[in-house]
């Protein structure tokens, strides 16, 4: 006698959403599915359809960011390098893509700023 595994399959078509609303003891639950254009399925179980769509939109944003190797203009600053302005990709105020010379200059200036802050802190401490 053959044993069969129970397989759950989604009926959600590509680029579309599918949802079902369940009620139990005056508690609403929405089972939500969305199949992206590349065929990847998103699903969740939440209280409202709006919550499901918000979760889907967050998932799409994260997925796009992971797949998108381009950066926005907000991530790029122009940094001087040997008299030229070089585009530098910054994440959390840290240079992620920069020439070796520009990186050394950036670190040198950052170190100088840190020394200035420490010097001011020492002066304040000495006055106290």
Image (tube, grey):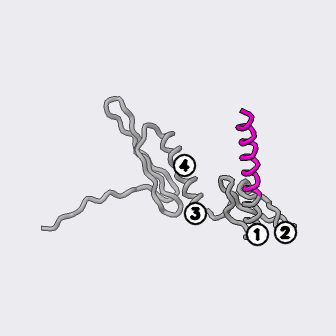
Quarter holding the C terminus?
A: top right
Q: CA separation, marks 4 and 1?
A: 38 Å
Is most of the magenta stretch helix, strand or loop? helix
Write down the residue under mark 3: 67
Give the spatial CA distance, label 4 vs label 3.
Answer: 14 Å
Label 3, secondary structure: give it.
Answer: helix
Image quarter (top left, top right, bottom left or bottom right) of the N terminus: bottom left
Which x, y percent locates residue 52? 48, 43
Secondary structure of the residue carrying tag 4 is helix
Label 4 and label 2: CA atoms lie apart by: 42 Å
**Residue tagged 4:** 58
As drawn, 128 above or below 95? above
Tell me which numbered mark, 2 or 3, is placed earlier along the sequence. Answer: 3
Disc 1 from disc 3: Cα separation: 30 Å
Query: Relative to the observer, which residue lies in front, 7 or 74?
Result: 74
Q: Who's the residue at 53% across and 44% down the image? A: 54
- Give the SS element for disc 1: helix
Q: Are marks 2 and 1 in contact (CB under 8 Å)?
A: yes
User: Residue 11 or 92: which is nearer the viewer?
Assistant: 92
Circle number at residue 62: none
CA distance for labels 2 and 3: 34 Å
Q: Earlier in the sequence, mark 4 or mark 1?
A: 4
Image x and y of residue 15, in percent: 52, 57
**Disc 1 vs disc 3: which is toward the camera?**
1
Name the residue furthest top. Answer: 26
Per the rendered image, the range of residues in magenta is 109-128
Q: x, y (%) of residue 61?
A: 58, 53
């Amino acid at each position: 006698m053959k044993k069969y595994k129970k397989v759950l399959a989604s009926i959600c078509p590509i680029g579309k959403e599918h949802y079902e609303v369940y009620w139990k003891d005056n508690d609403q639950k929405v089972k939500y599915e969305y199949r992206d254009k590349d065929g990847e399925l998103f699903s969740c179980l939440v209280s409202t359809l709006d919550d499901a769509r918000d979760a889907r939109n967050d998932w799409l944003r994260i997925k796009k960011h992971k797949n998108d190797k381009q950066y926005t203009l907000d991530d790029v600053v122009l940094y001087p390098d040997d008299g030229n302005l070089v585009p530098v990709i910054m994440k959390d105020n840290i240079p992620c893509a920069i020439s070796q010379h520009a990186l050394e200059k950036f670190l040198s200036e950052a170190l100088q700023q840190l020394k200035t802050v420490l010097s001011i802190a020492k002066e304040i401490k000495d006055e106290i």
